[in-house]
Amino acid sequence: MDQHDPSFRHAGPGRLAGMLRDARHYTLALFDTLAEAGYADSARVPRLGIINPPLWELGHTAWFAEWFVVRRAASSRPGDAFGHSLLARGDDWFDSNLVAHRTRWALDLPGTGAIRTYCAEVLERIQEGLAGEPVDDAALYPYRLALAHEDMHGEALLYTMQTLGLGLRSEMSGTMPAPPPQAGEIGFGGGVFLRGGDQSRGFVFDNEKAAARCRVAPFAIDAAPVTNARYLAFVEDGGYRDAGHWSEAGRAWLKESARSAPRYWRRGGDGGWQQLRFGRRVALAPDAAVRHLNLHEAQAFCRWSGRRLPTEDEWEFAALSGHPDFTWGSVWEWTASPFLPFPGFAPDRYLEYSSPWFGSRQVLRGASFATPARLRSPHFRNFYTPERDDIFAGFRTCAP
């Protein structure tokens, strides 16, 4: 095992223990910021479909780890875990399969202190369990799953903070500096690559299976995600007014949203463009990757510029190529690919991770500035509904 590899996918017990402690520390820091702003009280949290009450989210992350690690659940199906939760009604409160999103505001949850104590007790039991585990993928699978789950919820809490307009502490500003933008595009002559990578060892998400050798035709792709400056040209050319650039679904979204620019763009007093970033107005950074765009906006820019979105196979091929100019990691990137199972797919223990969402989501590849380094992988398939623009998402383009 490469001790310098930041990924959680091949981490042994010792490194996993540290990663799990780090993830919990980060989750609690995010929650504390939300609590200081009054959002530990679910009644004060806006009832939006894109966020959860922070106290519920905190309890859910600990419950998920307890379910799969401490209670050794065979699957996410109710009844498939051993014993009872450390919280008397933990399963009733925090099983996302049983607790509908719209009902999470009305739950009679324990107070913040009790939930924090629960988080600490679960983490302590996980650490004790890890100390006795062998360096074995099957034995470490639930620990790695719980870590990935908490890291994803950590990024989701940052989405919540952006949505609510809350400022960040310095340690929350991002887990990895954004790569510098590269001008121009890269041409690839096509070829064959192993989609999903080597799946004979380590942790693999179920939607990445089964690995397969895939061929891509020659294509040209942007070296980096589209920048604010490139997207501004589209905005100022009337891109949001010209319905011809938009798909049918995009036109419907545009009419309903009444947008004339990306979600967090505002005109300043001098007429220049600004962005809302965690409750602050900042000048639009021309060379930064444009973010908080939905799929419709990305597609409209592509039509306007005579380009297209890459397929997820093209994106993975480019990311695995080792080309020094291909940079990723500042924003999640919309692709042209709907979220569908690969041939040979079968759900893993977390049955609802992928299966319920096939056909209704679109694939995003890469990572954002807020994604922990250990979670980043060129094989990772993120997925959201086309209208989501609260996430840290942008895109890059391909030649026709």
Image (spheres, rainbow, N blue to C red):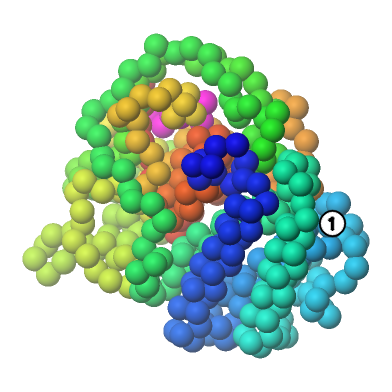
Q: Is residue 242 magenta?
A: no
Q: Is residue 307 magenta?
A: yes
> At numbered mark 1, what does the secondary structure look like: helix, strand or loop?
loop
* Residue 301 position (above or below residue 105): above
Viewer-proximal residue among 297 and 98: 98
Which residue is denoted by mark 1 in the rendering? 73
Q: Quadrant of residue 296?
A: top left
Could you tell me what secondary structure mostly forms the magenta stretch?
Answer: loop
Magenta highlight range: 306-315
Instruction: Give the amino acid type for the residue marked by disc 1 in the picture.
Output: Ala
* Residue 240 position (above or below residue 78): above
Please state if 11 lies on the left or on the right of 253 as rendered. right
Please state if 289 lies on the left or on the right of 54 as rendered. left
Q: Position of residue 329 (x, y in %)?
A: 40, 44
The tally of labels here is 1
Q: Position of residue 32 (x, y in %)?
A: 50, 79
Q: Position of residue 89 (x, y in %)?
A: 82, 78
Q: What residue is drawn where x is 64% and y is 87%?
A: 113
Viewer-proximal residue among 16 and 246: 16
Quarter of the image that includes the C terminus: top left
Q: What residue is drawn where x is 62% and y is 85%?
A: 112
Q: What residue is drawn where x is 50% and y is 35%?
A: 378
